[in-house]
Structures are given as C-alpha cells and as structure tokens.
Image: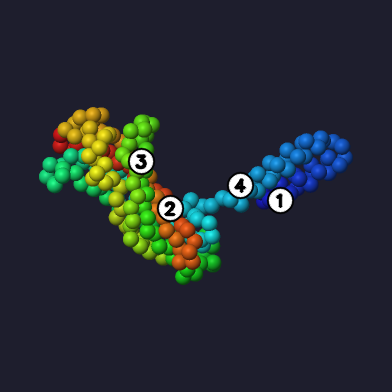
Amino acid sequence: MEDGEWRSGCSAFLILRYLMGKISCSSVRIFVLITVSLTLLNSCGEPFGGSGNSQVFLTLTVGSGNPVNIVSDVFDPSVPGNVTDDFADFEITSVPKNSRATSPASDVILNQQNVTYIRPDGNPEVPAPFTRFIGNILVPAGGTVSQNLLVLPASAKLKPPLSDLAFGGGEGQIFLTAVIELFGEDLAGNPVSVKGTMGITARDVFP
C-alpha cells in the first residue's frame, strides 16, 4: 500500500471512530497535525544536490582512481613562500530527476565554490572557510565533467593551526575534512548546488 493511501485510510478510520464516539476530539486533532506534518516533509524533500525546480540534481565525487584523502605539505622550502595550494580532481555528474522531462535548458553552469573545514576529533581549530569564482563549468544534463578544484589554499598554511605544524611542531599532523560546495544555475535560471567532501592530512612532509 502506498504511504499516501495508508494515511488517507487511517484518517477516514479515525474520523469514523470519532463520529461513533470511540475516541476523543483531541486524538483526531493530534493525528491530523501529524498527517499534515508528514505531508509537508514529503513535499519539501529534494534529492541530495537537487535544487528547487531544476530538472536535474548533481553529485560531486572524488575523481575515479584518485585518493579520497590527500596529504597537504604545510611547509615546502623548495617553493617561493614555502607554501602551495592543494588541488584535487572531482567528477560532477548530472542526474535527471525524470529522464523523460529533461531539455537543453537542463544543462547546468556552476560558477562559485565554497569550502569549509571540520575535524573528525571535533576540535574547532580549523582553517578559515573561503569562497572563490570558478569560471563557468558547464555540466550537460545527464553527463559528467571532471574538474580540478582547490581544496586548501596556500594562505591557510601561513596561519594557525596549520602553520604550527611546520618543522614537526604543534600537533604533528591534523586530519581535516574539506566540505566543498558548488553553486550555479541551469539554463532555465533555476538555482542548483552540490556538495562533496575530501579528506586532508596536513603535516610537514619533511620536518
């Protein structure tokens, strides 16, 4: 039996019992409130990466054959400034919500990237979040594109807690999860976003 049919049947049953004097009015009101709440939750639900009226939703995953965790060197004396940006390869996939309802307007253009960081140990000392313009990444409806994205900027290694790791100092190494969010819209003007993650082990590779 479908969920909607179950709720309709239960509603009718309770109302009938109420009319027969078997249950209280307050019980009926409580059930109606629960039913309305479930309906609202179901109607507001979107697939992960889905956005409003767009005919597609996106997924963001680490590129095939690439590690899901990278090592970030916080101090490299062989490069100017002793720090470098860290990039990783990702795949952005467009998945039609209804394969028979897509159109050329379902293609998506992504132009903004936000990155925040969390630590598995719950420690709040993490690199600062950042936002950057990423050009216009075109993701065809139902297609996949590969993209090299910045996951940790060099500037983050010049400030605590990462700068403390130089020469083996501080905690020695810090495990981070970078939460990458991409934003844009489809060609019909509907906003679209997608979120993915990348593990980062930050340390001084040769202290």
Foreground residue among 17 and 184: 184
Q: Residue furthest right?
A: 20
Foreground residue among 64 and 178: 178
Looking at the picture, which amino acid does disc 2 mark? Answer: Val
Q: Earlier in the sequence, mark 2 or mark 1?
A: 1
Crowding near pointer 2: few (<14 within 10 Å), some, many (20+)?
Answer: many
Q: Which mark is residue 5?
A: 1
Instruction: Give x and y (percent) for residue 197.
Output: 37, 46
Looking at the picture, which amino acid does disc 3 mark? Answer: Tyr
> Are the residues tagged 1 and 3 within 8 Å (C-beta)?
no
> Are the residues tagged 4 and 3 within 8 Å (C-beta)?
no
Instruction: Give x and y (percent) for residue 143.
Output: 41, 63
Residue under pointer 4: 41
Residue under pointer 3: 117
Residue under pointer 2: 194
Residue at left offset 25%, top offset 37%: 159
Say if residue 142 shows up in the picture. no
Foreground residue among 188 and 94: 188
Cα separation between marks 3 and 2? 16 Å
Q: Earlier in the sequence, mark 3 or mark 2?
A: 3
Q: Mark 1 or mark 3: which is in front? A: 3
Q: Earlier in the sequence, mark 1 or mark 4?
A: 1
Residue at left offset 47%, top offset 58%: 191
Cα separation between marks 2 and 1? 33 Å
Say if residue 29 shows up in the picture. yes
Q: Quadrant of residue 168?
A: top left
Instruction: Give x and y (percent) for residue 144.
Output: 38, 61
Q: Mark 2 or mark 1: which is in front? A: 2
Cα separation between marks 1 and 3? 44 Å
Instruction: Give x and y (percent) for residue 32.
Output: 73, 43
